[in-house]
């Protein structure tokens, strides 16, 4: 039976493995679950899951969701943090390369650049701790979340963000709470700290990570980071810094 105009039905993919290539699963919209060795990982919009070659995995894509798989030959697979299944934060720059590679793989439009190698170089820098963020689904809450996801340094208040979409702050707050389980403020804080953790792992200074994620002072950033991860930013950087 037709489920209605504009809706995309759920899809289930049985377990499979690719010994000759790794897979990057980019959640472009909605959510999915991926089962690896009996462990379930939930993908949400704005993140991707890196699955090394030879790793068995099964998928369930939720209704009205878009999950885009990209394959990289095993010979190009990045080292370091991506030797195991890893979460990857998809920022504007990485999203552009993913879409360009998808264009190459599905059309005759082929820029004169090795996009597979470029993607392989970019991925380790964007490895992040597992995310617990859920994207809202209703408009304009999802549009505000996308902005905060892509530009965590955006310092506008909730009232200002809501006004730009011609709704009240209370309307947005109700949508976030109902659809994500978090207030807009808590959601923004968690996203900022995810991005900060990724920057610290890439050897960024705590002051830079604080500025890039919209904190007015390093001390405020330090307090928020310790509440989230249990250690201060400098210690996190020491433990999780990627090899040069």
Image: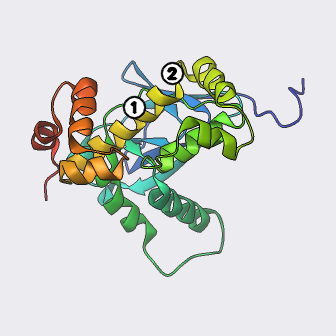
Of 169 and 21, which appears nearest the observer? 169
The image position of residue 101, as x and y in percent, is 53, 63
Quarter in which the C terminus is drawn: bottom left
Placement of 49 over or under 39, stated as above or below: below
* Residue 167 in the figure: left or right of residue 59: right
Question: In which quadrant of the rendered view does residue 219 lie?
Answer: top left
Residue at x 25% of width, y 24% of height: 227
Disc on res. 182: 2
Circles 1 and 2, Cβ within 8 Å, touching? The answer is: yes
Disc on res. 190: 1
Residue at x 58% of width, y 63% of height: 105
Regarding mark 2 in the picture, which secondary structure is present there?
loop
* Residue 196 in the figure: left or right of residue 32: left
Of 44 and 72, which appears nearest the observer? 44
Placement of 112 over or under 74, stated as above or below: below
The image position of residue 65, as x and y in percent, is 66, 35
Placement of 111 over or under 177, stated as above or below: below
Quarter in which the N terminus is drawn: top right
Regarding mark 1 in the picture, which secondary structure is present there?
helix
For label 2, the crowd category at 10 Å Cα-Cα, with few meaning under 14, some 14 to 19 and many 20 or more, is some
For label 1, the crowd category at 10 Å Cα-Cα, with few meaning under 14, some 14 to 19 and many 20 or more, is many
Residue at x 38% of width, y 51% of height: 20
């Amino acid at each position: 039976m037709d489920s209605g105009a504009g809706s995309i039905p759920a899809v289930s993919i049985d377990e499979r493995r690719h010994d000759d290539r790794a897979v990057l699963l980019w959640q472009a919209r909605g959510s999915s679950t991926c089962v690896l060795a009996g462990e379930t990982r939930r993908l949400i919009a704005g993140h991707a899951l890196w699955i090394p070659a030879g790793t068995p995995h099964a998928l369930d894509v939720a209704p009205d969701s878009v999950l885009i798989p990209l394959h990289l030959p095993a010979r190009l697979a990045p080292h370091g943090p991506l030797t195991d299944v890893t979460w990857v934060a998809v920022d504007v720059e990485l999203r552009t390369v993913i879409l360009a590679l998808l264009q190459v793989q599905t059309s005759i439009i082929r820029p004169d650049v090795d996009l597979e190698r470029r993607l392989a170089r970019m991925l380790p820098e964007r490895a992040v701790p597992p995310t617990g963020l859920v994207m809202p689904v209703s408009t304009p809450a999802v549009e505000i979340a996308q902005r905060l996801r892509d530009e965590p340094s955006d310092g506008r208040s909730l009232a200002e963000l809501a006004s730009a979409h011609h709704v009240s702050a209370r309307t947005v707050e109700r949508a976030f709470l109902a659809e994500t389980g978090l207030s807009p403020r808590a959601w923004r804080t968690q996203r900022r700290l995810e991005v900060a953790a990724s920057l610290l792992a890439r050897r960024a200074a705590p002051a830079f990570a604080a500025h890039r994620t919209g904190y007015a002072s390093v001390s405020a950033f330090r307090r928020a980071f310790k509440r989230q991860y249990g250690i201060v930013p400098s210690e996190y950087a020491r433990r999780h810094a990627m090899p040069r």
